[in-house]
Amino acid sequence: MVLLHIICNDRQQSAEIADLLVTESLVLSAVTFQSVSVKEKQSDGSIGQSEQTLLIGRTRGILFNTVEARLREVHGAAMPVIYSVPIVNMNWKDADVLAETATEYED
């Protein structure tokens, strides 16, 4: 199991992605953090800051590539940043639910 972290461009994109991932059973649930502050080094060496939205969802590690491909299909050039963080401990009943609903995506 992993936590997907998806850094979205805005609230609307976050809501669309959450609906997609939950509807297609690619995550158990989606949690959104509005207006997270992102600081990045700019090409001129200065530090830029922007407000973005963080979406977190629990899923199986094997589904990461499927999630990434679906997001590329839907968002193309506006693709959000996506990465996963391993879950060491959790309520494993949730893992069973995800295993039952997400088997169609496995090879």
Image (tube, helix red, strand yellow):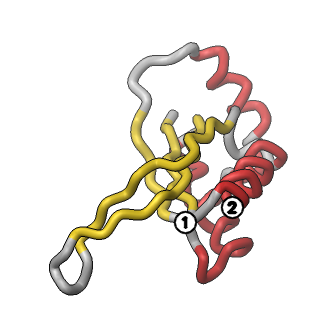
Q: Nearer the viewer, residue 52 or 60?
A: 52
Could you tell me which secondary element the residue under label 2 belongs to? Answer: helix
Q: Residue furthest bottom?
A: 44
Residue 106's place in the image compared with 65, above or below, is above
Q: Is the Cβ of the residue at disc 2 closer than 8 Å to that at disc 1?
A: yes
Amino acid identity at mark 1: Pro
Identify which residue is drawn at 52% across, 49% down: 35
Q: Nearer the viewer, residue 66 or 35?
A: 35
Identify which residue is drawn at 68% across, 23% down: 96
**Which mark identifies residue 80?**
1
Residue 25 can be seen, yes or no: yes
Identify which residue is drawn at 26% across, 78% down: 42
Q: Considering only order in the chain, which callout, 1 or 2, is on the residue closer to the N terminus?
A: 2
Residue 107 can be seen, yes or no: no
Could you tell me which secondary element the residue under label 1 belongs to? Answer: loop
Q: Which percent across, then down, holds residue 52? A: 51, 57
